[in-house]
Amino acid sequence: MNYLWETDTFLAATGGRPVGELPEGITGISIDTRTLKPGEAFFAIKGDKFDGHNFLVAAMKAGAAFAVVDESKLVSLGSLTLPLVVVRDVMGSMRRLAELARVRSKAQIIAVTGSVGKTTTKEMLRTVLSASGAVHASAASFNNHWGVPLTLARMPANTRFGVFEIGMNHAGEITPLVKLVRPHIAMIMNIAAAHIGSFETIDDIARAKAEIFSGVVPGGYGVINHDDRRYPLLKTLAETAEIDHLLSFGEKRGSDFWLREIEPTDEGSRISTRLRGVDVEIEIGVRGHHMAMNAAAVLGVASLAGADIVKTREAFKRVVATDGRGTIYHKGGSGAMGISIIDESYNANPASMEAALDVLANFDSVRTKRRIAVLGDMLELGKQSKKLHEGLAKPISAAKTDLVYLVGPEMEHLARILPKERIGGHYTDTSRLVEDLRTIMKPGDVLMFKASNRMNFSKVIQDLLE
Ligand SMILES: Nc1ncnc2c1ncn2[C@@H]1O[C@H](COP(=O)(O)OP(=O)(O)O)[C@@H](O)[C@H]1O
Ligand SMILES: [Mg+2]
């Protein structure tokens, strides 16, 4: 049997006390009984809403090998047939397992942070590196104080490439996470106003992201965005952190991973790059300048990590949009015959809004008759919210948008300053939106939907497609 962890090793690493008959090993680690697979260890983590200790019966029914529980909760658990590993601190024991996973690993370890595009880039790395060897990467956006240790503790011993998304909402959060991950390569995709709520300035956001350099192993690499306004600041911060090698990606001349040209194709884009002097062309199954930037960075990092470049190039063709991050739907035939819908419902902040408006602007300009942007509130922007919503007026007009539909109270700020003839409607919620859009949509229209996830735009798109 190929275990993720032998039970003996598991007990030694966590310092846990076995109760009951433990199997020889575990096949995986779970913190959620709804997705737990038989043979996995269940860690009873205490979250904001739930405490895993209340789900031990469910864990047993789902076939957990054993549960890791807190010593202090033991008396209140009652009698269980599920074997247990009793520890002083469940999360702490997960971190110790994570440390051991890192110590035993021979993988090339890559950490990805940035204000937007972390998950997109992480998934792109997963796709292209898989062509060269076994990849272990974060699930979903598991990028915080529990997501990162969980991802690391789950990393199989035979992993060749480990890819970790690292996020933050406050200064000081990345440091302990990156010290656990100890990447060979640390990427900062960009710096922008996302979750600005807890920061005074965007420079402060850059400083918090740059904490990722503090965990890079000796001889390792930092990879940063040459086109970003905070490039000089990030460069200085990387030097202060004594990173051994600092490389850049971007359209600016002098970028180590230089994005030279983007051409739209039927299925996505063709991208010409020059990687430290070597010309490499790739094709990807997604549109957009932002995706090309991510791809240039990923291509460069894949080469740094020792991936087979021929296989990597081939694998880029398998890079496609994931749910709500640029997925394109056609209703009633493609091109001028039908209506195209760009689904960007997964999330929104000023940087990703601008990126998505750029995709709308460049969408099949021959057959497109009208460009319609349906935009909902960008949440968690704190006291900058008004200014940042108003700031969308510029990219909207640059994108030659014919009509704009706005949803949510924050979008009121934008509604007030956009030319009246451009506004199709402004709504407090999505209830009447679908009906109104149905009546105005015509063949040749392209509609781009983008809002913060909580605005529920994915439901609006589903209803429209019905
Ligand atoms: N480099 C980029 N610049 C701007 N927007 C991007 C970039 N990469 C992806 N996006 C868009 O940003 C949104 C969030 O992407 P995601 O990868 O989930 O970010 P994160 O994991 O950092 O929250 C999506 O709409 C995506 O298409
Ligand atoms: Mg993410």
Image (cartoon, grey):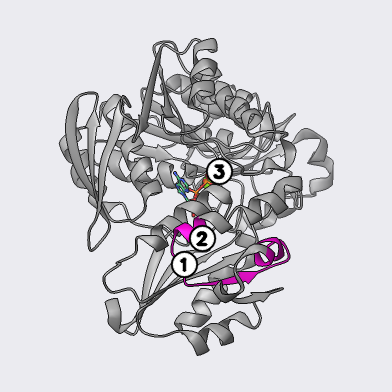
Identify the magenta region: 395-416
Q: Residue at x 69, y 67 (%)?
A: 408
Residue 437 locus on image (x, y percent): 53, 83
Q: Quadrant of the N terminus?
A: top left
**Disc with the residue nearer the chain's start (2 vs 3):** 3
Count of numbered circles in the view: 3
Choose top left, top right, bottom left or bottom right for residue 325. bottom left
Residue 399: say if magenta: yes
- When the figure is inspected, residue 444 is found, relative to residue 283, above or below; the finding is below
Residue 453 vs 82, above or below: the answer is below
- Looking at the image, is mark 1 or mark 2 earlier in the sequence? 2
Task: Farthest residue to the bottom: give it.
Answer: 439
Q: Are marks 1 and 2 in contact (CB under 8 Å)?
A: yes
Residue 393 x, y percent position in the rendering: 57, 58
Disc 2 residue type (three-letter):
Ile
Q: Of discs 1 and 3, which sits in the foreground?
A: 1
Residue 395 located left or right of residue 207: left
Q: Is residue 96 magenta?
A: no
- Find the distance from the CA under tag 1 to the CA under tag 2: 6 Å
User: Which residue is under mark 1?
Assistant: 401
Specify the label residue 174 is tagged with.
Answer: none
Q: Which residue is mark 3?
A: 142
Q: Residue at x 65, y 61 (%)?
A: 377
Question: Where residue 396 is drawn, which disc sits there?
Answer: 2
Sequence-wise, the earlier of marks 1 and 3 is 3
